[in-house]
Every structure is written in C-alpha cells, then in structure tokens.
Amino acid sequence: MDDNRSPFTDVDLTIEDYRPFSMLSLVSLLLSLFCGMLVIVNPPMAPGAVMAAGFAIFVLAWLFPRRRKINGYKMAGCALFISLFAISSSLAYQQHRRKHLEQTAVAFSENWVDLARQGRIHELYQLSLHYNNRATPETDLVQKYGTLTSPGPELELYLKQEPEVSIRQDAEEGQLRTVLTKYEKLGILKERVIVGFKYTRPNGDVREFGLYLVRMDYPTPPGPQWYVEGLVNYNPKIARQLTDQQRGTESMPEDM
C-alpha cells in the first residue's frame, strides 16, 4: 500500500492537503459566546453583542478569499449567528419590557384618576411623593395632612390643583381617554413614562394633560415603586405649584 494513503479513506494525506486553523475565528466564537451570555444575564448589554458581530463579519471577510487554505470560516459564521441571535433577543426583550412598563404606567394613571374621582385626596397626594417621603402604611393620613374642610398647609395647596379639582367635581360623569405613552430611560435605577390624557367634562369642555410617572428601583422590600413626578396641563395651560414634600430630595433606603 502507498505510504501516502490512509487505510480508512482514499483521500491523500499529503502535506499539501493540510490547512492551518485561523485563531481569529476561534477568538470570534469565544467573544460571541461571552457577549451572548452577558446579554442573557443583562439584556441591555446588547452593544457588546454588536461589537462581537462586527468582529465576526471582519473575520468572515478576511477568511473568504483564503477559505480553501485556512480553516475557520464556518466557525466565524457560527460566531456571527450567535451574535445576531443575542442582539435580536435583547431588542425583543427590551421592546417587551418597554411595552409592559407603558401598560403598567397607564394602569397607575387610571388608578390615580379613580382616586381623584372618589375624592380620596390624601392617597392621591401620597402618589405625588417619592417613596421615602410618603407616610408609612400605618399612619393616619387625615391626622397627618388634615381634613378636606380643614386641611394642613401641604394638603391645602394640593386641593387647589388642576385637573384634580375638576375630576373630583365631575366624579364618574367625566370621560377620560389615553392619547399617548412615551418611555424614557433616566438612569440605571430610574425610568419615566409620560401618559397623555384627553379629559371631556360633562359640559363638553375638553382638557388635555400629561402625567409624568417615574419608576424607581429600590431593594426588595419594597422593590420597584411608581410616583407622579409631575403633571402638565396642556390645554388649557394651568400652572401647578409644588408643596414642600414634593420638593423633597429623593433618597434611597438606608439598607441599599
């Protein structure tokens, strides 16, 4: 038997058939796997997967004219697939999460309107405060802020704010419609959703206002908390004033 032939195949195993392996393709695969794992743990890390995809494309472009002489082209292609999968997964997750937060904000806004309609001003005012500035659950809000007929200074100012006054007067007769939601990322622990409303009063007057809602991440407990960061009366334009508590500096729990 010819010394240059294998007993298991009829392919010549001469030195001319040997193709060196590209270390770039291996690095590309490892980088894609690493970035893909980061995206699974933390979806906002998608820029890392984008970088890995760019590197994989570079390796593929470099190997393409050399693929008959150097091994690793398929491995680089696999690296590109993993990177693109990680990117698409991250985008899908973030889109789903954004939609979920917008829906949660709308539900929070509708609860806010219901409290105004029912005249539950003490609870309504609490929602306009940062979590750490709110009264504890066992606190008697009437004793803390006063009654609606004899309010303390904080509640007295809040009782004059629009559109809360009109919504409370109209009760269930007013018609409310959500016209827009807008998500904004403010930081690592802070996100904002703007919910725009069109409110039609029983007499036919139409008012437009927007609630600026903030979701703040706290350690568990209490976990994520929402509050009304601000309210803008667009039509008609009616200025609002902040109480001392609403001006309070936001802080995190001591055990964070």
Image (cartoon, helix red, strand yellow):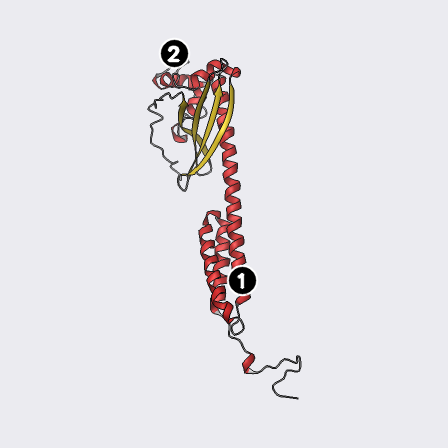
Q: Residue furthest top?
A: 149
Residue appearing at x 50%, y 51% in the figure: 87
Q: Name the amino acid type tagged 1.
A: Gly
Q: Give the numbered dot on residue 203.
A: none
Counting from the top left corner in percent of width and height, residue 235 is at: 41, 22
Q: Is residue 252 left or right of residue 63?
A: left
Say which of 230 and 249 sits in front: 230
Q: Dot 2: few (<14), some (14–19), or many (≥20) neighbours within 10 Å? A: few
Q: Quadrant of the C terminus?
A: top left
Q: Quadrant of the N terminus?
A: bottom right
Q: CA distance from mark 2 to mark 1?
A: 73 Å
Q: Which residue is mark 1?
A: 77
Residue appearing at x 38%, y 28% in the figure: 133
Q: Are marks 2 and 1 in contact (CB under 8 Å)?
A: no
Q: Name the amino acid type tagged 2.
A: Ser
Q: Is residue 157 visible?
A: yes
Image: 25 above or below 146: below
Residue appearing at x 49%, y 70% in the figure: 22
Counting from the top left corner in percent of width and height, residue 75 is at: 54, 65
Q: Which residue is mark 2?
A: 150
Say which of 160 and 189 sits in front: 160
Q: Which-is-in-front pick, marks 2 and 1?
A: 1
Counting from the top left corner in percent of width and height, residue 154 is at: 36, 19
Residue appearing at x 55%, y 65% in the figure: 74
SS class, disc 2: loop
Q: Dot 1: few (<14), some (14–19), or many (≥20) neighbours within 10 Å? A: some
For marks 2 and 1, the one nearer the N-term is 1
Q: Is residue 140 visible?
A: no
Image: 66 above or below 89: below
Image: 23 above or below 186: below
- The image quarter containing residue 166 is top left
